[in-house]
Image (spheres, helix red, strand yellow):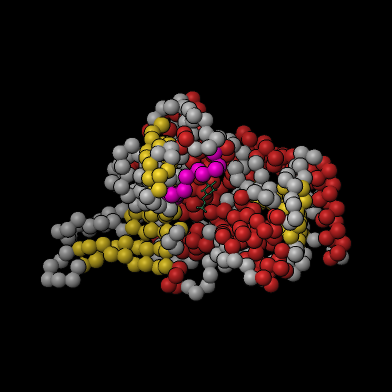
């Protein structure tokens, strides 16, 4: 959503956690694609900060492999790679040691000097939560990130582990930097299909009049993942699906679906409208948590004909862990538009397939003139891997009788556009360089999202084993997730065949 097509001002980008997985899989491929599409300024430098020693520029070979494996544009060609990689450097350093920041400052000052101006500076903190504050402190104390208009700090999730730690981190950062400089990233907001929801809702007259509790029966937002937790046990066991996915990605999607039309298409108005939704989500009591939220953990099973071990057997998982890898919940928004409309959210790892879908189910037709039962209208917004919007409506089956059957009206990106779809990180990184925080989380949004999930965290903490279900890897999660939908629906659209837990 960057205001500018390309950035002209020379830019220095510093990635803390420069040898990490995110850098290799997402950040460098995204910067490379921005470089290819000429969105990066002509003069840029990317400095990777990491704790390990680098021998013979091995890091560049790793980055090349990362782009080849994960970039939408595939393996870099020699010429482009030569130019791009000549701007990337590695600095070994410990984030807890001030000398790291002294050396960093020297590099940044030298880049300014070479370009005869104070350049843009972006500090991307792709590091474990315990290093965020020390790193931010190092930047602050050494006056490296001190120009509000030019310097930005990007903080990856998890932003805190609960409301108190998120508030503490917000206070810590806001004491040292202006809120304008702080970019709390939630990559779901950068996805093309998610950005399109605003266009769909607010640029088309036909949907606004029916986008409320008078016409909408319920909403489902499901992010089903086929992947396991893989090697992320160290992080995931302390997090679980609630903190890893609901607190951020799913609640953000809910905001985009439920927000009022912002007064203007600008940063403040859009973020205000989203924050207003979060603040109106009904908080649960402990008893309500166990009635409205289902949690489960995967056991061994088979995915794509491959054996998958159970969660408790994964690397770095406490053998008696009660961390959930699946969660489904019913939420209500207490405002005029949404009163009485349940929002069902679900996400899980090791499910049969990947599918991120928002489903809006409309109320049944008020006219009961046909012999057949009518199927209510449904709007399906598929975020990934399919990128499409389809509307399900009743139609007469050709023939001599009045027989009804639901049919679909489809819009797919593939058929409608020739333009390539940028990766979420491309959009978001360009926005950071451009200083546009519209698609990033403001401090109050992050805190409001934590407030929604805190009753659940607390209820589970107090009753660690209560109603913790199991599901075999490769199945659609526990049956209790389906029961949650009653009486609104018989099955989830994305978790269609929930099997016995
Ligand atoms: C991350 C979570 O934020 O989002 C991961 O930490 C999850 O656990 C990922 O797999 C999902 O993102 P995407 O873009 O692959 O749907």
Residue at the front extreme of this rendering: 56
Q: Does residue 322 lie above or below 348 as drawn?
A: above
Quarter of the picture holding the C terminus: top left
- Residue found at the far bottom of this picture: 418
Determine the residue positioned at 63% across, 35% down. Answer: 165
Measured as percent of width and height from the top left, residue 48 is found at 73, 53
| The N terminus sits in image quarter | bottom right
Up-down: is 353 above or below 169? below
| Residue 78 % position (x, y) | 67, 70
**Residue under the point 42% across and 72% down:** 415
Q: Is residue 226 magenta?
A: yes
- Quarter of image, res 41: bottom right
Which residue is at the front of the view, 381 or 87?
87
Q: Is residue 147 visible?
A: yes
Residue at 72% across, 45% down? 52
| Residue 434 pos. (x, y %) | 69, 62
Depth order, front residue of 38/83: 83
- The answer to which of 157 and 352 lies nearer the viewer is 352
Residue pictured at 65% horizontal, 56% vertical? 62
Residue 451 visible in the snapshot: no
Residue 213 in the magenta stretch? The answer is no
Q: Which residues are magenta?
A: 219-233
Name, please, the residue furthest toward the top: 462
């Amino acid at each position: 959503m960057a205001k500018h097509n390309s950035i002209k001002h020379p830019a220095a980008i510093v990635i803390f956690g420069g040898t990490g997985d995110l850098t290799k899989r997402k950040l460098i491929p995204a910067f490379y694609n921005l470089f290819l599409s000429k969105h990066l300024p002509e003069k840029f430098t990317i400095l990777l900060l990491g704790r390990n020693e680098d021998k013979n520029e091995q890091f560049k070979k790793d980055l090349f492999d990362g782009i080849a494996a994960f970039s939408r544009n595939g393996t870099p060609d020699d010429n482009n790679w030569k130019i791009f990689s000549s701007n990337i450097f590695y600095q070994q350093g410990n984030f807890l040691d001030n000398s790291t920041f002294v050396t960093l400052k020297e590099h940044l000052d030298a880049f300014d000097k070479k370009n005869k101006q104070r350049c843009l500076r972006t500090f991307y903190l792709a590091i474990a939560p315990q290093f965020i504050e020390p790193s931010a402190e190092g930047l602050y104390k050494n006056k490296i990130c001190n120009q509000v208009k030019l310097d930005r700090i990007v903080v990856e999730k998890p932003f805190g582990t609960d409301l108190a730690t998120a508030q503490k981190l917000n206070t810590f950062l806001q004491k040292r930097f202006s809120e304008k400089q702080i970019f709390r990233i939630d990559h779901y907001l950068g996805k093309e299909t998610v950005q399109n929801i605003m266009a769909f809702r607010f640029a088309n007259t036909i949907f606004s009049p029916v986008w409320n509790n008078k016409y909408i029966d319920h909403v489902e937002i499901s992010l089903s993942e086929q992947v396991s937790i893989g090697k992320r046990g160290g992080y995931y066991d302390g997090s679980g699906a609630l903190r890893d996915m609901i607190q951020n990605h799913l609640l953000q999607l809910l905001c985009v679906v439920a927000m009022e039309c912002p007064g203007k298409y600008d940063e403040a108005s859009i973020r205000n409208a989203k924050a207003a939704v979060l603040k109106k989500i009904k908080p649960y009591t402990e008893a309500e948590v166990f009635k409205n939220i289902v949690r489960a953990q995967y056991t061994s099973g088979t995915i794509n004909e491959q054996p998958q071990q159970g969660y408790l057997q994964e690397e770095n998982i406490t053998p008696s862990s009660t961390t959930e890898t699946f969660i489904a919940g019913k939420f209500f928004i207490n405002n005029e538009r949404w009163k009485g409309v349940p929002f069902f959210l679900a996400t899980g790892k090791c499910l049969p397939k990947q599918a991120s879908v928002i489903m809006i189910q409309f109320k049944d037709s008020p006219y009961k003139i046909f012999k057949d039962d009518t199927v209510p209208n449904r709007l399906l917004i598929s975020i990934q891997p399919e990128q499409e919007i389809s509307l399900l409506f009743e139609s007469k089956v050709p023939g001599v009788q009045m027989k009804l059957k639901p049919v679909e009206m489809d819009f797919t990106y593939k058929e409608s556009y020739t333009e390539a779809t940028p990766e979420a990180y491309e959009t978001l990184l360009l926005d950071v360089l451009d200083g546009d925080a519209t698609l990033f989380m403001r401090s109050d949004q992050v805190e409001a999202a934590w407030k929604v999930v805190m009753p659940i965290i607390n209820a589970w903490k107090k009753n660690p084993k209560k109603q913790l279900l199991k599901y075999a890897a490769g199945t659609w999660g526990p049956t209790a997730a389906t029961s949650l939908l009653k009486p609104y629906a018989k099955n989830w659209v994305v978790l269609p065949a929930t099997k016995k837990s």
